[in-house]
Amino acid sequence: MEFSWKIVIDAGAISCALLVATLLRAKVRFFQKYLIPNALTAGFLLLPFYNYFFPSIGYAQNKLGELVYHLLNISFIAMTLRSSPPKVKGHKGGGVLGMSTGILLGYATQALLGLGLTLLFLPKIFPSFGLFLPLGFALGPGQAYAIGKGWETMGFEGAPSIGLTFAAIGYLWACFGGVFLINIGRKKGWLKGADLSALNDKAITSGVVPLDAQKPVGARLSTDSEAIDSFSFHAGSVVFTYLLSYLLLTGLTYLLGFAGKTGRELAVNLWGINFIFSSVTAIVVRKVLDKMRLGRVLDDDTLSRISGFSVDFMVAGSIAAISLVFVGKFWAEILLMSTVCGIMTTLIVPWFCSRMFRDNEFPRMLMIYGVSTGTLSTGLALLRVMDPEFKTSVASDYMLSAGLTFLLAVPFILSINLPAKAATSGDMLYYWIMMAVAGAYLLYVLGSYAWLARRKSLAKPGSLWYSE
């Protein structure tokens, strides 16, 4: 009798790489200095194995992309199921709308940049090539892989691997760019007292709690283990919510089928952003539990551990899933686009965030910078440097902003296939329509920013960081 061991082999390979990466972080100064996440190191350790060694023995890597996709959605659910932080009277920090505006800033600027740079290389590259900047940087590996699979059916060979490559480069920008911003913030006095004290935690640099330090509590029991283990209950709650989001998307796909070809194309794109549907479903589940006064059965710390587990395995798996064969064909275009995008994002995110928010400015900036270069995983990794236990409202504001962002991003989602359609139809009008859509998003972002920042909108325009 034969059983499939693929998921065990993949999980085992990623686990082994994560353990080796943890050892490297604990012992090697370079990894400590730049706060390189262990999952990022693990992914690059696995990259040659999945590209050369495993294929030589008949083992394929293509299913790793699907693993990345599901883990991303699970991480969103686990974080969104957490309880909302206590409301602070007089809170005027920009909150949910500010986080949403920051996220859409990445969508708009990266899409415009990518589409503009694509014009330099046509017809060598596929017209939708440049959209992998917002897909890989701002949306992340799961979305880049899923939408790339759709473009592959439209003639873009190797699109999923190219999308994952942009996502991996985005992670590097998040890591090195994030550390650069932290260091420059420390030198120039951008950080406040609580932020500075968090940086002095030795466990943050080495990645391991020191031997003589008290180990922090990572989770609390909310059920009696004789009945059901608390972790099993929380894992079941997360997976059950994921099932609900699957049923929701399945129903939407069925209904959109009645709209013909356009509806079916939209349905494909919706599956690519399932993390938003997962977040919305988790919000509803949490609201129902709170209404029934059952929210106490979910422990926030346990949910954070589930999310952290998903994020670490997702990041490592997404990098390992990259096919170097396809990437090698477009290395010059990928290098140019990702470099310009990384520099642009590193400059505009601090400029906007320091003026747009009125509380936790630096942690909020790090969170938005992380999600603008590598999605939720790197955003949370950078936020952990300032807020290890997510005690501020930054993480929850980001999660709550997911629903608003989705509603505002519907036109972007509807238009994402237009450049690819320009290739299949031979009509570049579709390409220019997508450019106009990205421009409209930028106008919306600038309007929202002006409303949130008010008098600070254009204050000290020559300064990367505004401080009163």
Image: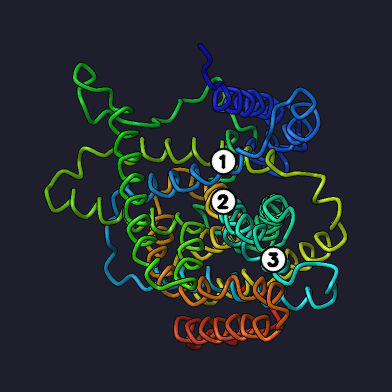
Of residues 45 and 259, the one drawn nearer to the viewer in this rendering? 259
Q: Which mark is residue 14?
A: none
**Residue 142 circle label:** 2
The residue tagged 1 is 314
Q: CB atoms at circles 1 and 2 under 8 Å apart?
A: yes
Give above or below for 88 relative to 163.
below
Percent coordinates x, y for residue 73 in the rendering: 45, 48
Mark 2 and mark 3 in contact? Answer it, CB < 8 Å. Answer: no
Q: Tell me the element at label 1.
A: helix
Q: Is residue 455 above or below residue 302?
A: below
Dot 3 amino acid type: Thr
Residue at 75%, 78% in the rendered image: 116
* Mark 2 or mark 3, earlier in chain: 2
Residue behind mark 3: 346
x, y (%) of residue 120? 84, 76
Q: Is residue 213 above or below residue 360?
A: above
